[in-house]
Image: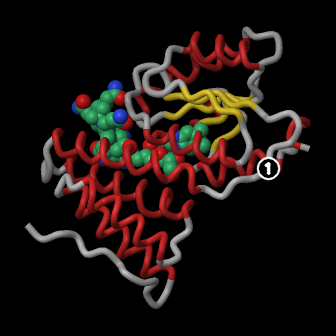
Amino acid sequence: MNRPRVPQTLSTTPDDCVIQTRAAYLAALLLADARSAQGVIDAALAAGLAVDAAYLEVLAPAMHEVGVLWERARITVAGEHLATAITQGVLARLAARLPRRSAGAERPVAVLGCGPEDFHGLGTRMVGDFLQAAGWRVFDLGAATPASAFASVAAEHGAHVVAVSSSRAEHLDGVREVRRALNGLPSPPLLAVGGNAYDGYPERASAVGAELHAADPRELLARLDAMSLPVLS
Ligand code: B12
């Protein structure tokens, strides 16, 4: 089987670099070749690809493409699981390379997770990596988190924001449960939401009672910055 072609230098435009890198990364995922996948990302970073672009313009869209291929029965469930595991490994190394912002005296606190019954954990992990690099203290509860767990961890650590990821519309009732659980706290944190379930339906965010919706972690950080929370100023 052919090994995926890895870009050796930044091609004529940054867009070309992203497109080539995404194609090579997807090819490595489909071959279940973890070493090549890591090699594609390392080569692209060495050629000048920004780390946040590696997250949002290479890894996330490549995983979305994996979903399309699975939906069309072009790859098996096993292929999808392998692609997820490889991407988790790549993320573990990439997180430390995200540009760091210096934290203030009091670091803002975020509690993250997928809503109840939602098993898709990569999105929240990306959100957590970006927030952590921006100086936040992050408590990532991961996949399928019960509403009561969001509330208890938020109370324990004095969370400023609770961020809930939903990949499917079927999981939005679970986010309403999270909202209700947070409303029961003496100082309810902001509820931020995102994930596939809101793509093309941003109004779903206010319908579940969220104060904030963002398409990706970069946009979430920009929105949080714009809100000038007391702890961030
Ligand atoms: C891998 C995968 C799985 C794995 C997840 C393993 C894991 N450990 O995460 C497993 C095998 C468990 C799985 C199961 C299922 N899956 Co699935 N899965 C995927 C796949 C291929 C990739 C998910 C992923 O990692 N994406 C990469 C991340 C980075 O992208 P993301 O989640 O969109 O996150 C980005 C943004 O949305 C945003 N974001 C995400 N969360 C948040 C939160 C906040 C606060 C903010 C601001 C932003 C934000 O930032 C991220 C970076 O840009 C997707 C395809 C897709 N389109 O994503 C399907 C997909 C989500 N799955 C799908 C389906 C149907 C299922 C199942 C129902 C299949 C089945 N019949 O069993 C089950 C449901 C299980 C459950 N109860 O949740 C469908 C959903 C379709 C729909 N609209 O309903 C998809 C879209 C595949 C498809 N094209 O059909 N899946």
Of residues 63 and 29, the one drawn nearer to the viewer in this rendering: 29
Residue at 38% in and 43% down: 88
Residue at 86% in and 42% down: 104
Residue at 19% in and 52% down: 32
Q: Is residue 215 left or right of residue 44?
A: right
Q: Is residue 168 left or right of residue 195?
A: left
Q: Secondary structure at mark 1?
A: loop
Q: Answer with the quadrant where ligand 1 appears in the image.
A: top left
Q: How is the image coloured?
A: secondary structure
Is residue 198 something that shows in the picture? no
Say if 7 sits above or below 183 in the image: below
Is residue 162 something that shows in the picture? yes
Which class describes the residues within 10 Å of circle 1: few (<14), some (14-19), or many (20+)?
few
Of residues 162 and 134, the one drawn nearer to the viewer in this rendering: 134
Q: In the rendering, at what x and y percent does residue 9 appear?
A: 42, 84
Say if 161 sits above or below 64 in the image: above
Q: Which residue is mark 1?
A: 102
Q: In the rendering, at what x and y percent does residue 80 appear?
A: 23, 44
Of residues 109 and 163, the one drawn nearer to the viewer in this rendering: 109
Q: In the rendering, at what x and y percent does residue 52 appear?
A: 56, 60
Residue at 56% in and 50% down: 96
Q: In the rendering, at what x and y percent does residue 41 appear?
A: 40, 64
Q: Looking at this rendering, what residue extends furthest in the bottom direction?
A: 12
Marker count (numbered): 1
Say if 127 sits above or below 113 in the image: below
